[in-house]
Amino acid sequence: MMPDILCLGEPLLEFNHVGGADWRQGFGGDVSNVTVAAARQGASAGLLTRVGADRFGRSLVEMLEAEGVDVSHVSRDEDAPTGLYFVTHGETGHEFAYRRTGSAASRMAPQDLPPGLSGASVLHVSGITQAISESARASVTAAMAAARQTGARVSYDPNLRLALWPIEVARPTILRALASCDIALPGLDDARILMDLDDPEVILRRIQEMGPAIVALTMGRDGVLVGAEGEVHHIPSPTVEAIDATGAGDCFDGAFIARLVADDTPLDAAVYAAHAAALSTLGHGAVGPIPNAQAVRDAMRRTKDRSQIRAN
């Protein structure tokens, strides 16, 4: 049986520098993080991907299974490795170094997709998956088309990574995907580059004009702008003593989609997801600090941020 939320992308093994000579092994990959975040909120979520037939790939699958993620569409590649990345921290924030060229996930192809993607309510994809190889890019396009045919909503995060592909290729590809999705989840920094605009509200409305019914523009410490049903709202970011923002945007995406599937309004889903994302910065790594639903509900009761929401 297909999970309610099906995510297509690359899971990675993570090594996070926590000080001195110490590195903490964890898990990451933007779409994989989204899947785990959705599952921790109680949603039915699954990952569609390829991993290497190596210890790293086995560790990732074991982690996903422990999180309650459906791994029935995770295939193992005997000839390609599982991707890795390293996180370091400095005055300007966190920095990433990847070892993913030629990875198993980069070899995903449209023929790897389950027939029709039947049964999923939401398909989530990202610009990073489109960037890692031409065959992965074709897989995203094919998956989005298949989701449309079955009536599933498509969720899309541009996640622009210019180290993976040039802007001349990235911009038209991402803009086409934004125009074809139902739920757009861009980050402000990426959107400014892609849209060649600066003002967040102008960016959000321009993306709305492209076609998505729901747009949630994440702005880091400045919170989230969410546009849906003819209204735009600003949700402040809860104040926390952040340790590591790795994967915070992915946590937002997973929590937001999970609440939409649970029939929350886009505004309520965004309030919930903003709290989840803030809590996810309280520890090192992308997956470990992702909160569960109880932690998010407790934080919402403490902060009462709904009183701060303003309509624009």
Image (cartoon, rainbow, N blue to C red):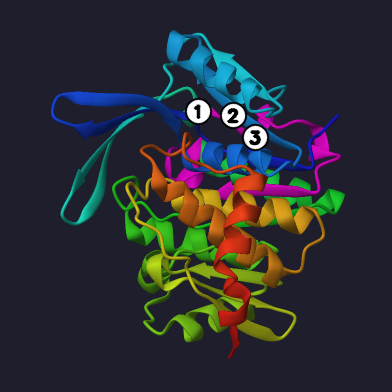
Give residue 270's position: percent from left, percent from top. 62, 66
Circle 3: element type: helix
* 292 to 304, vertically: above or below: above
Q: Are marks 1 and 3 in contact (CB under 8 Å)?
A: no
In the image, is 178 to the left or to the right of 105? Answer: right
Q: Which residue is mark 2?
A: 49
62 vs 292, nearest the viewer = 292
Boundaries of the magenta span:
108-135
* Residue 82 image point, x, y percent: 43, 20
Q: Residue at x 37, y 78 (%)?
A: 196
Q: Nearer the viewer, mark 3 or mark 2?
A: 2
- The reply to whether the magenta stretch includes residue 111 is yes
Amino acid at dot 1: Ala
Q: CA distance from mark 1 to mark 3?
A: 12 Å
- Reading the chain from its start, which is encountered first: label 1 or label 3? 1
Q: Residue 105, which numbered label?
A: 1
How many residues crowd mark 3 within 10 Å: few (<14), some (14–19), many (20+)? some
* In the foreground, 173 or 70: 70
Residue at screen point 72% across, 22% down: 72
Please give the label number shown on residue 110.
Answer: 3
Lower position in the chain sequence, tag 3 or tag 2 = 2
Which residue corresponds to the image point at 58% horizontal and 42% vertical from the top-left? Answer: 138
Q: For the view shown, which residue lies furthest in the front direction?
A: 302
Q: Secondary structure at mark 2?
A: strand
Q: Residue placed at 44% from the left, 15% from the top?
A: 56
Tell me whether the residue at label 1 lies in contact with that at label 2, contact meaning CB atoms closer than 8 angstroms.
yes
Q: Nearer the viewer, residue 30 or 18?
A: 18
